[in-house]
């Protein structure tokens, strides 16, 4: 399973100060996204997940300068979420240096836009979902009744989406559900957050998930990246 460091971008900075050596009193804190990514890549990260926090609020990319600064200092793929729910926004993200994009759940109700996004991003496109039943029920769907996560994933995979990002709002992921989705659908399943220690990481690994996206746990030093990579193997 791939361990993917995540950084929330706000006003060009990381919303969470990174200090991986905090527990040992080593290293120095920084909120510079480019420096944080260089550190993770130096430790072996092969993919970095970026969340345009401002873009998620406004609906269009807002931290592309920060994405560009990161891309100029590293050669690993950058996966951008937040404000990239249109073909035009994806083009801007790719021009800035992102190599993958994550669309929001809302794209499932906009099939024409999804097709346009797939035409631009292809295999480098993912859709983010909060699979918790109560969250799916509360989502403002344009359809007559809310879908189940299984039917929604089947719908998206049938439309050509090959990668899903399951976010649980910081709560523990439903491991049985993750395992079922992995076994049922021909898609790459990434789990975002909800893991606070190495035991939790191993439990996600054992579901067969392709990757685990970790933000605060890595940035704070609660989980050291090399140890996470070892536990995910």
Image (spheres, rainbow, N blue to C red):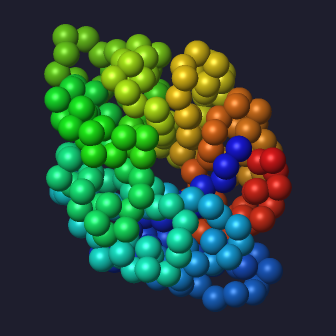
Picture quadrant where residue 218 is located: bottom right
Q: Position of residue 186 (x, y in %)?
A: 55, 23
Work out whether residue 172 or residue 54 is closer to the camera in this orientation and state it: 54
165 sits to left or right of 58: right
169 sits to left or right of 217: left
Q: Position of residue 66 (x, y in %)?
A: 36, 76
Quarter in which the N terminus is drawn: top right
23 sits to left or right of 60: right
| Above or below for 1 versus 177 | below
Residue at 73 percent of width and 38 percent of height:
205
Q: Position of residue 11 (x, y in %)?
A: 30, 75
Residue at 71 percent of width and 72 percent of height:
43
Residue at 56 percent of width and 40 percent of height:
190
Work out whether residue 196 or residue 72 is closer to the camera in this orientation and state it: 72
| Above or below for 8 versus 180 | below
146 sits to left or right of 162: left
- Count of marks placed on residues: 0
Q: Is residue 61 visible?
A: no
Q: Position of residue 98 (x, y in %)?
A: 39, 62
Residue at 30 percent of width and 38 percent of height:
118
Picture quadrant where residue 116 is located: top left
Residue, far top: 144
């Amino acid at each position: 399973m791939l361990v993917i460091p995540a950084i929330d971008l706000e006003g060009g900075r990381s919303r969470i100060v990174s200090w991986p050596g905090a527990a040992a009193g080593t290293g120095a804190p920084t909120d510079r996204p480019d420096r944080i990514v260089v550190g993770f890549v130096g430790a072996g990260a092969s993919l970095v997940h970026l969340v345009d926090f401002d873009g998620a609020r406004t609906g269009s990319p807002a931290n592309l300068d920060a994405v560009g600064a990161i891309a100029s200092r590293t050669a690993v793929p950058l996966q951008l979420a937040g404000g990239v729910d249109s073909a035009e926004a994806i083009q801007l993200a790719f021009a800035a240096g992102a190599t993958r994009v994550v669309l929001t759940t809302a794209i499932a109700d906009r099939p024409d836009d999804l097709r346009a996004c797939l035409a631009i991003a292809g295999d480098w496109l993912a859709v983010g979902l909060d699979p918790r039943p109560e969250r799916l029920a509360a989502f403002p769907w344009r359809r007559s009744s809310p879908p189940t996560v299984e039917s929604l994933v089947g719908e998206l995979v049938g439309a050509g989406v090959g990668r899903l990002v399951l976010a649980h709002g910081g709560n523990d992921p439903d491991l049985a559900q993750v395992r079922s989705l992995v076994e049922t659908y021909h898609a790459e399943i990434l789990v975002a957050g909800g893991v606070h220690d190495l035991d939790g990481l191993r439990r996600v690994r054992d579901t067969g998930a392709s990757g685990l996206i970790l933000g605060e746990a890595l940035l704070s030093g609660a989980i050291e990246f090399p140890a996470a990579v070892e536990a995910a193997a």
